[in-house]
Image (tube, rainbow, N blue to C red):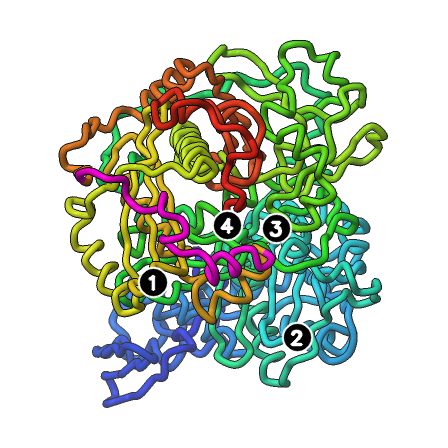
Amino acid sequence: MAEDLADKHLAIAPHFTVHQEASDRFLLFAEGRSLRLRGDLYSRLIPRLTGERTGARILAEIAADPGAAPDAGEQARRTLVSLYEAGQVVALAPGADVNRQAFWSEGGLPPAETELRLASARVAVAGLGRGAAAGSTGAGALTGMLMGSGFAPGDLRTAELVVALVDDYLDPALQDLARALGSERTWLPMRPGGRRALIGPLMGPGFGGATGGGCLACLLRRMAEHRPNDALAPAGAAGPRPARAWLPASLEMARAAATLEITRMALDEGETLSGALLEIDGATGERRLHRCWTFRDCPVCGPEAPPPPAAAEPFPLGEEASVDSEIGGWRAWSAEQALARLEPLVSDLTGIVSGIVPGHDHGRGLYVFNASQATRGGVDFTRNRRAGKPGAASGKGLTEAQARVSCLAEAVERYGSGWSGAEPRIRARLADLGEAAIRPEALLGFSERQYAERARINAQSSPLHHVPVPFDETAEVEWTPVWSLTHEATRWLPTRFCYHGYEPRGVPGDHPFALGDSNGCAAGATPAEAVLQGLLEVVERDAVAIWWYNRLARPGIALEGIADAFVERMLAVYAERGRQVHLLDLTTDVGIPAAVAVSSTIEGGGRILMGFGAHFDPRVAAERALTELNQIIAFDGPEGAEAEKAEFDGHLARWLETETLDRQPWMRPAAGALRDVRRMPRPEAPSLRGAVLEARDRLAACGIEMLVHDYARGDLPLACVKVVAPGMRHFWSRRGPGRLLEVPAKMGWRDRPAREEELNPIDFVL
């Protein structure tokens, strides 16, 4: 060690202040600690530790001191080594700022080595924006701060790190710089201005000890998904939303944060900006990290586009252990485990969910969350941005954690089902695919009469019930491969049926014979869980359609034994609103319990609203119906008026204003004793895979095939699927032949199948 210190300029670590108590006693004070040194040796050693002498010179002078003991030099060497190893003596960089070196030593870093590392790390700043924030003035200010921290200035051609300042991350100049730097250069985007300054993520191979690898195309794609109305603005030199709000203090705060993060990376002290965007609140200084996601179909960082698929990949259900039926209906994770996975999605910059807020009665134990969310955009975000409002998701549960998970999972499934343009598909005519193609009429369920009268129907009904154009079997359209769990074989579905926001390009034969919808879309911790939840939704909506359009009086279900504490709270809140609640059993020939929770006013039985649920466990089916009712009830009130108009086009409002239980008596429990969930068969929770296979077999017994479309694209934290069961009915107005007319007679609820003209003239209201 003596040899290591011989040539170093040594000093008491500069973050210490030295006080001499007596000739042989010294106090060393730092910000958070103090140290006392005593002994004659220190009176010889400490005055020489000023940074002006090397270790060799200090030891030589002490050994030559008059009156020094014969072994004074060796004692001084051992003491010096001990102080050095404890960080109380350090090597200083001659001429470097002493306060900066004190900062390094306070943090346990050797000042001289740190100064050398920073001086050799050349950083360049490019001002791509305008003015004091992100223009040349801003670039000069950040460069000065970096130099004040020990960095040497670099130029854009040779710097190890380039910091790109912009007024808006969607400024085209940022993309131009990325192309100019290429994939082998490391750089860092930054928006210093704005109420929220943004720094990162680190792009390229890396800097210092930090790992790079960020993709600008993926980052901007997700940002653009949160900014749909940018498409309405003319292209600008600084991007559509240049940051204009800042104070000199907020700019300094942002520059300081960037300088510290760059310093930490250069010194291998952290990777904050690896795969993350740092936000600095200009008013409070609060820091927040936003995780940055990558897309498998990204044309910049993703793999080469595969050839058109010849078949679907077999869908892996997996072998899974039994699950607990007490955690939300046969789930692989607890709500808390799921939240840990889903919370990083909440970011209005890089996440799927912009924000999540509790519902109106959340504080009273009726747990509902509502979220605004991004809508999946195209691979080329500059071409495919859609104007309009952000998407929305909602979730409910018996507990706050369950409701939050439910909301975030719904956001995942809605995002996952969106169209980007890179999805596997082929172009073909129906006849080209043979029996593997599923005919659109089996998926949609419209009647010939509806097609014939579509102009009148569409002019009078809610958009949810619009009738598309008939399918042209001779047209060449796009088809998506899906997997049949029933026959373990490939099936082909129309691509426009599989995705929200489908945009055909270069498909002359395409015509709007179908639109994507959420029926059967689900997310889960595992593929089997996602399939099970999607299938339960298909069963639920099929049961609702059969009940609603046939106006079937169904047996009631007693509220006792269904999450008693929750139901007690719920009934109390509803009573204060002047409302009552009852449950009906909607279970069909499939044999999977389904329920509807019906709420109406106590006086007059009006303003009827409903929630639905289905599950192998009848108790869980009833719980889901009740908790969904808590979501729907928000539409009956001032806070729900605008949402109702946007989503239902006044259709629901007319129902609330005119219909009562007296006018719709079939919505009351049928005569007879109420069914008690405590006495209904309650199956043990099997493995999730076992539950899916049981559902598959029940559908097969009804002559129904079970198909799964996997939405996995590498950018979702959960498995996400669409379950399709051709022949099962949607609760929207689709009045064609099949289960809608036949099941009531099959089950003995009607003496014969209904005719179309006998069905409920009121389209389903939700």
Which of discs 3 and 2 lies nearer the camera? The answer is 3
Give the mark, 4 or 1, whose residue is nearer the N terminus: 1
Q: Is 86 colored magenta in this rendering? A: no
Q: At numbered mark 3, what does the secondary structure look like: helix, strand or loop?
A: loop
Specify the amino acid type for callout 2.
Gly
Q: Is 650 colored magenta in this rendering? A: yes
- Compared across the picture, whether 276 is left or right of 57 comes to right
The picture places residue 739, in percent across and down from the top left corner, at: 48, 24
- Residues at discs 3 and 2 in contact (Cβ within 8 Å): no
| Vertical arrangement, residue 332 with respect to residue 316, above or below | below
* Of the pair 446 and 324, the residue shown nearer to us: 446
Give the mark, 4 or 3, whose residue is nearer the N terminus: 3
Q: Where, by quadrant of the figure, is residue 536 drawn?
A: top left
- Residue at position x 34%, y 43% from top? 596
Q: Which residue is mark 4?
A: 765
At label 4, counting other C-alpha atoms closer than 10 Å, the crowd grade (few under 14, some 14-19, many 20 or more) is many
Q: At numbered mark 2, what does the secondary structure look like: helix, strand or loop?
A: loop
Q: Where, by quadrant of the figure, is residue 732 drawn?
A: top right
Question: Magenta residues?
Answer: 649-673
Specify the amino acid type for callout 4.
Val
At label 1, counting other C-alpha atoms closer than 10 Å, the crowd grade (few under 14, some 14-19, many 20 or more) is few
At label 2, counting other C-alpha atoms closer than 10 Å, the crowd grade (few under 14, some 14-19, many 20 or more) is many
Q: At numbered mark 4, what does the secondary structure look like: helix, strand or loop?
A: loop
Cα gap from disc 1 to disc 2, whole angstroms:
58 Å
Specify the amino acid type for callout 3.
Ser
Q: Which residue is mark 1?
A: 604
Cα gap from disc 3 to disc 2, whole angstroms:
45 Å
- Residue at position x 74%, y 12% from top? 431
- Residues at discs 1 and 2 in contact (Cβ within 8 Å): no
Give the mark, 2 or 4, whose residue is nearer the N terminus: 2
The picture places residue 354, in percent across and down from the top left corner, at: 53, 59
Q: Which residue is mark 2?
A: 193
